Image (spheres, rainbow, N blue to C red):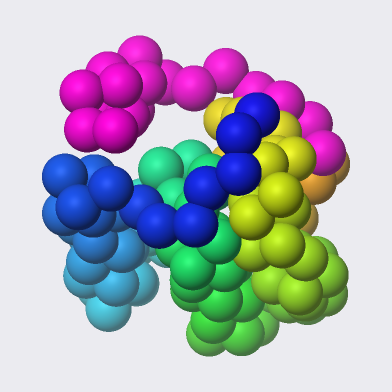
Amino acid sequence: MKMRTAMPDALKPYFQNELENAARCLSKKDFKSSWYHLERAHILGQPYPYQHTLAHWKMLQFGIQIKDRREIVGQIPRLLVGGVKSFVGEIPLGNTGGANVPPLRTMEIPDELKRIMEENK
């Protein structure tokens, strides 16, 4: 892992699109789709401190909005240390970021996201 501080400009629109899709789905009460897009945003943003922290902030807000105590409690430590872990380059690649998965578990990155990350670094 190498230390990263800023997301490449070419990758930012993909990250932002996932957050916008998550918000749109949440406004329609399509919680499953909203969460799907938050997980994708997390995977894209995880290597970068600001975006990693923002993804966890959005996940915490999601948990609050749907009144999911487990997600709220699970996001607080992730929110506090996620960005720091990104800064020092110690992240479990592919981890989807939710309280439903161990925070240090490396996971398979979906092929589409892998391609986006490779082509926009």
Point 69% across, 71% down: residue: 79
Percent x, y of residue 106: 71, 26
Give residue 67's position: percent from left, percent from top. 65, 82
Q: Relative to residue 60, is residue 111 drawn left or right?
A: left
Q: Position of residue 86 (x, y in %)?
A: 64, 51
The answer to whether residue 71 of the structure is visible from this angle is no
In the image, residue 12 lies in the stretch drawn in magenta: no
Residue appearing at x 40%, y 57% in the figure: 6
Q: Is residue 96 left or right of residue 58?
A: right
| Camera-side residue of 29 and 80 | 80
Which of the 4 image quarters holds residue 12?
bottom left
Q: Quadrant of the C terminus?
A: top left
Image point (24%, 61%), residue name? 16
- Is residue 1 or residue 26 the one in the foreground? 1
Quadrant housing the N terminus: top right
Tell me which segment is drawn in magenta.
104-121
Image-quadrant location for residue 70: bottom right
